[in-house]
Image (cartoon, rainbow, N blue to C red):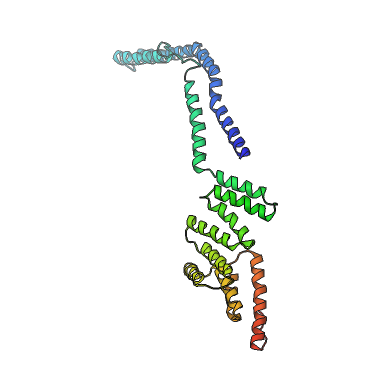
Amino acid sequence: MTPLWIGIGLLLLLALWLTWLPLRRAAGVRDALTAFEADDRNNAENVAIYRQRLAALEAALAEGEIDRERFAEDRAELDRRLLEDAGGGGRRPLAAATAGRWLPLLAAALLVGGSLTFYGLTGSRDDLALYQVVQRLSHAPQETRIAGLAAEARRQGDNPKAWAELFPLYRDDGRFDKAIDVLDRLIELQGRQPALLAQLAQMKFFAADRTLTDEVQALVDETLTADPRQPTVLGMLGIDAFDHARYAQAIDYWRRAMAGYQDAESGKALRQAIDVARQRLAAQQGEPVPSR
């Protein structure tokens, strides 16, 4: 977790620095504005423009283009605009460079508090901790890996990913009772998903010495009702058929199961099992079975 918090801290420091950056420049900006307002060049330009427009207005009056009433109205408008543009008395005084320093403080507090709250609500600290445990135990002995992941799963009792990491270790170690307990917990957390029910049926099948008990059959029926192509259940049914010398049925189950597996290793294992079943079927029938 330390690298994560270091990264969060560095990002927050960068955000705080960007928040404070405008304050560091406030004094310079205020000095520039003060100097600009103290410069009389703008007023001189406004007066020159006023005089040009007044001269044009007087020429129009002299040539009879406008009467004295119109002249008086237009000159009053020119005088008003000159006062607005060149009069300095109407400007509001500039605020001090230190004014409003509490706003960045408030923004910084909201930034830090909001970021940590958002991460607490949406972050995956448990998943990160689980990943670190898996990486740390990746080269450890089997029993050490099981003990470490079991402890992490108990610590993260409501995290299905932790239990999902633990399940294959129990399964591959032949500890079917423990694997069944883990699957029960996963089903409690994630619901009766076909893939989980299929794994549970398979573990109970092997725990019962490869026997299709009533409990296992009920799980099989529930799984195939939800997903008729579920490969784990079809593979298990193929094993049961093979054990009872129903080789043609075993071949059919395993061929259907192959369509549902994505990994090449499972497909290879099923093809080898199908080849054995074909040989047994040929010996059973007393005639060769063509390979497909």
Query: Is residue 176 shown above or below 248?
Result: above
Query: Is residue 211 shown above or below 127?
Result: below
Image coordinates of residue 118 in percent, x first then y, are: 49, 39
Quarter of the image that includes the N terminus = top right
Image coordinates of residue 78 in percent, x first then y, are: 38, 15
Please indicate, yes or no, whether residue 63 appears anywhere in the rendered image. Answer: no
Task: Name the residue nearer the viewer: 216 or 70.
Answer: 216
**50 relative position to 183: left or right:** left
Image coordinates of residue 191 in percent, x first then y, are: 47, 58
**142 relative position to 71: left or right:** right
| Residue furthest to the left | 69
Task: Name the residue nearer the viewer: 60 or 32.
Answer: 32
Task: Name the residue nearer the viewer: 9 or 64.
Answer: 9
Please indicate, yes or no, whether residue 17 appears anywhere in the rendered image. Answer: yes
| Residue furthest to the bottom | 286
- Within the image, what quadrant is residue 14 found in? top right
Residue at (64%, 62%) from the top-left corner?
172
Image coordinates of residue 43 in percent, x first then y, are: 46, 12
